[in-house]
Amino acid sequence: MYYDSWYSMHTMKTSPTLSTLALAILGLISQRSRSGYDLLKVFSDTPMGHFSSSPGAIYPALKRIEESGLIKGDIETERPLRPRQVYTLTKQGKEALKRRLSQPVTHDDVVWRVDDLLLRFVFMGNILGRERTLRFLNEFVERIEAYLSSLREQRNAQQENGSLYGRLALEHGIESYQADARWARRVIKELQADES
Amino acid sequence: MYYDSWYSMHTMKTSPTLSTLALAILGLISQRSRSGYDLLKVFSDTPMGHFSSSPGAIYPALKRIEESGLIKGDIETERPLRPRQVYTLTKQGKEALKRRLSQPVTHDDVVWRVDDLLLRFVFMGNILGRERTLRFLNEFVERIEAYLSSLREQRNAQQENGSLYGRLALEHGIESYQADARWARRVIKELQADES
DNA sequence: AATTTCATGTAACCAGTTACATGATTCA
DNA sequence: TGAATCATGTAACTGGTTACATGAAATT
């Protein structure tokens, strides 16, 4: 017993974090059952297309995710057209999605994965609720402020050595993050006002 | 003769567009000769790190780029420490970089590769000159405005069907691009004032 | 009759991530 | 003496891109 659990603790495949594409797919499927083609449409027709992409990415991804047990495909019979595989979240899928959405906002997220953070935000409200979405947004603002400090320092320090264009690009970064923070603060207010 | 050129036109390996990482590497090397380790430092110490990354990306990239003839590595002898490979741009390298920087700003660039655009901007000034940088920035603003229109339309159309959170995320996108355009307009003014 | 839409996929290629390896030198 | 720095790389894995393939139904 003791041995067993020790053993399994250390051999259990720690499921790798869901990629951004996997997050997008799980999130969309969590809203309603969808086929690969449905997903393809969402990506090509909406700004969601900012994430993927092409059949060559989506169909293999669906297969991988199904193999890992997070979604389950059912073939729609009784259709005039070519049969569709319609995917639904499994219990593990729902849990995995919740876990993914519950991750704290890290420095690295802010530096490298702002898109991913935005994607989390989109699905978070309906799955984790307003309360936790607000916590997320506050973390987001905090992390951005911290990063902004270091960017501003860099700009001031750079004064001499850096090129004009490098400095201007840095300022682009600063202004982008400022815009992100402004947005988040506005949304926080909006969600708090909406407390009805 | 006629045949030859027809033949070569259709078999010449059209050199694939430089990846963003390759652009960053070429750009940095164009400023001064650098070793892999030098590049690694730039990426880890400056906001340039927004692009790569790790030795596992940079060293193989350097090799590939050298094989394609755009850079040339020279071993620094006469050093106490382990010898360094210091890379310099070749003539083809300079040309390839210029070509890459001269690409027009496309819709897809704005939607998927804003980072790449910013990176181009960083190196553009010193390589293509102020005139062409200004053209670039104007194109950038135009493309953004066009994309913003479609994003705003989406937001208005979506009014009913979309979720609250989806709408808010869309607004994040809109505000981000607005910030990009504001930045570009400011830089245009600054560069024009600087016409000294 | 031709094109677009519905619908799903495969295969080759390329490149990035993670983790590991090596080993000398300098600094605390 | 141990850690950090200088300096370069490899190997396995993963997954995205591009291009191709198929074929029926609906639309123009």
Image (tube, coloured by chain):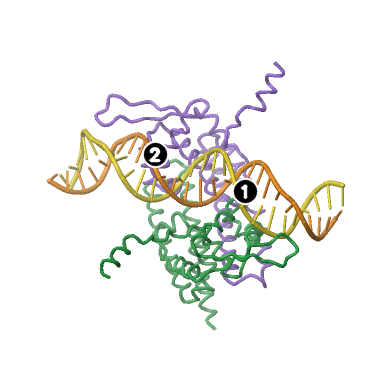
Chain colours: A purple, B green, C orange, D yellow
Q: Is residue B81 left or right of residue B146?
A: right
Q: Is residue A75 above or below residue C11?
A: above
- The chain carrying label 1 is A
Q: Position of residue B81 (x, y in %)?
A: 74, 61
**Dot 1 crowding, Cα within 10 Å, few <14, some 14–19, many 20+:** few
Q: What residue is disc 2 on?
A: A39
Could one spot residue A113 in this view of the protein? Answer: no
The front one of B116 and A23 is: B116
Helix, strand, or loop for circle 1?
helix
Taking the view exactly as shown, the residue that stands out farthest to the top is A1
Q: Is residue A138 above or below residue A74?
A: below
Which of the 4 quarters of the picture holds residue B99?
Answer: bottom left
- Left or right side of A116 for D4: right
Q: How many marks?
A: 2
The verdict on a common chain for dots 2 and 1 is yes
Give amino acid for label 2: Leu
